[in-house]
Image (cartoon, helix red, strand yellow):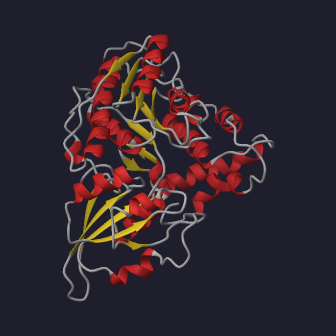
């Protein structure tokens, strides 16, 4: 749930809101793509259990630094859903978003009646269509939930980024970690030429190696980038490593425009060796990010450390990365998360509720209700919905992945 609702959001959520007992399948997304009649640019899928958004951002900006025109489709968004679709790291404008929304609204009545189009599916297909309209050189697509069960599998990707895979969405993506990994990695197919993976368990690594053999794909490793959080640094390093290899792949290809850049495009875009030291220029709000807020009514300025940590391990790393021993800690973990393990690490924290449709203990205040009691610097930890509210509260920049 984003901090701000836009009227143009409604068509993307319409069928999900009215789904009743209808199933979510890929049939509606396939039909939508057929109605739009487009050929997507060469694409890269980003799959995994954690770190996908950071990896997608680093991958996109590494390719952009190589002179390529990149459209990225990621989720969830923070302040507005315009952030889900970006060109060279910058969210589409409100006018562009409204045009996409209007086009989708026109096509919704033509979709199959026995299924519903999920919001993720709507953004993925409409974003890919927009990428083709913009003449993008590469499309970076983050999976919404799953690989073969998600719209990310509807593309013939040239590369695949695999972030750490663990037991997440059990019962939906699979009953075991190997089953979940099989689902996620199956976003790819024989079109995949390069696979880049974060460190994995032996069982997950075995599945990746098997697919690489089946697809005759190259496996590339990565080195963590410097960052205050080692988890964020790992994801940035993964994105940079794959971006560098894909840039080489496109540079060396003589395929047609629909598949790769031709020689004229390489000259026109100034395609060059990508700068793989992009960590310092990336703006990644909500991922161990720091935000400086001017104090009001004579109060001192505040520094907010913000991290979407929803597991004990992630909370532990976030607290170490923040290094703010005297800060007020405000957190938000619904009953569906491992609240006890997380709360044990932040005794005395101010707990709040956030978003809609999530269950919390009775009586918790909202962020806005509690904010007046904060004193000094703040560490904010919790779900994406909560982090969206925090970033709105501090007025953080979320429209661009590039430092201004």
The residue at the point 72 percent across, 45 percent down is 116
The residue at the point 70 percent across, 39 percent down is 28
Question: Relative to 18, is 214 on the left or the right?
Answer: left
In this view, the residue in front, 280 or 11, is: 280
The residue at the point 25 percent across, 28 percent down is 270
The residue at the point 28 percent across, 52 percent down is 317
Among the 4 quarters of the image, the one containing residue 222: top left
Residue 404 % position (x, y): 24, 55
Measured along the vertical axis of the image, is residue 169 above or below residue 76? above
Q: Would you say residue 328 is visible in this rendering? A: yes
Measured along the vertical axis of the image, is residue 290 above or below residue 250? below
Q: Would you say residue 135 is visible in this rendering? A: no
Residue 309 % position (x, y): 38, 55
Which residue is farthest bottom?
297
In this view, the residue in front, 236 or 94, is: 236
Measured along the vertical axis of the image, is residue 1 above or below residue 28? below
Residue 258 % position (x, y): 48, 22
Question: Relative to 118, is 139 on the left or the right?
Answer: left
């Amino acid at each position: 749930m984003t901090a701000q609702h836009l009227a143009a959001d409604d068509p993307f959520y319409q069928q999900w809101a009215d789904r009743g007992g209808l199933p979510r399948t890929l049939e509606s997304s396939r039909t939508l793509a057929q109605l739009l009649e487009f050929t997507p640019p060469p694409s890269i899928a980003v799959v995994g259990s954690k770190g996908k958004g950071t990896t997608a951002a680093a991958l996109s900006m590494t390719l952009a630094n190589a002179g390529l025109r990149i459209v990225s489709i990621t989720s969830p968004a923070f302040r507005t859903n315009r952030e889900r679709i970006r060109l060279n790291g910058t969210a589409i404008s409100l006018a562009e978003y409204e045009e996409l929304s209007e086009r989708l609204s026109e096509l919704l009545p033509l979709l199959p009646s026995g299924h519903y189009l999920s919001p993720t599916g709507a953004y993925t297909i409409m974003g890919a269509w927009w990428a083709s309209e913009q003449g993008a050189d590469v499309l970076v697509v983050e999976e919404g939930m799953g690989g073969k069960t998600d719209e990310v599998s509807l593309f013939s990707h040239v590369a695949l980024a695999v972030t750490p895979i663990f037991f997440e969405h059990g019962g939906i993506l699979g009953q075991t970690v190997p089953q979940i990994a099989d689902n996620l990695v199956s976003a790819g197919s024989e079109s995949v030429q390069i696979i880049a993976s974060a460190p994995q368990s032996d069982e997950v690594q075995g599945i990746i190696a098997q697919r690489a053999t089946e697809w005759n794909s190259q496996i590339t490793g990565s080195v963590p980038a410097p960052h205050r959080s080692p988890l964020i640094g790992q994801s940035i390093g993964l994105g940079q490593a794959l971006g560098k290899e894909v840039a080489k792949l496109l540079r060396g290809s003589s395929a047609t425009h629909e598949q790769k850049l031709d020689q004229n495009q390489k000259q026109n875009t100034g395609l060059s060796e990508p700068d793989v030291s992009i960590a310092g220029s990336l703006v990644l709000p909500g991922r161990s990010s720091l935000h400086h807020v001017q104090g009001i009514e004579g109060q001192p300025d505040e520094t907010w450390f913000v991290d979407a940590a929803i597991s004990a391990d992630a909370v532990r790393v976030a607290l170490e990365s923040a290094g703010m021993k005297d800060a007020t800690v405000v957190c938000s973990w619904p009953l569906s998360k491992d609240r006890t393990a997380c709360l044990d690490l932040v005794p005395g924290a101010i707990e709040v509720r956030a978003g809609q449709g999530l269950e919390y203990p009775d009586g918790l205040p909202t962020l806005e209700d509690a904010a007046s009691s904060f004193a000094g610097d703040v560490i904010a930890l919790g779900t994406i919905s909560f982090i969206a509210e925090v970033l709105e509260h501090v007025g953080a920049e979320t429209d661009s992945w590039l430092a201004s």
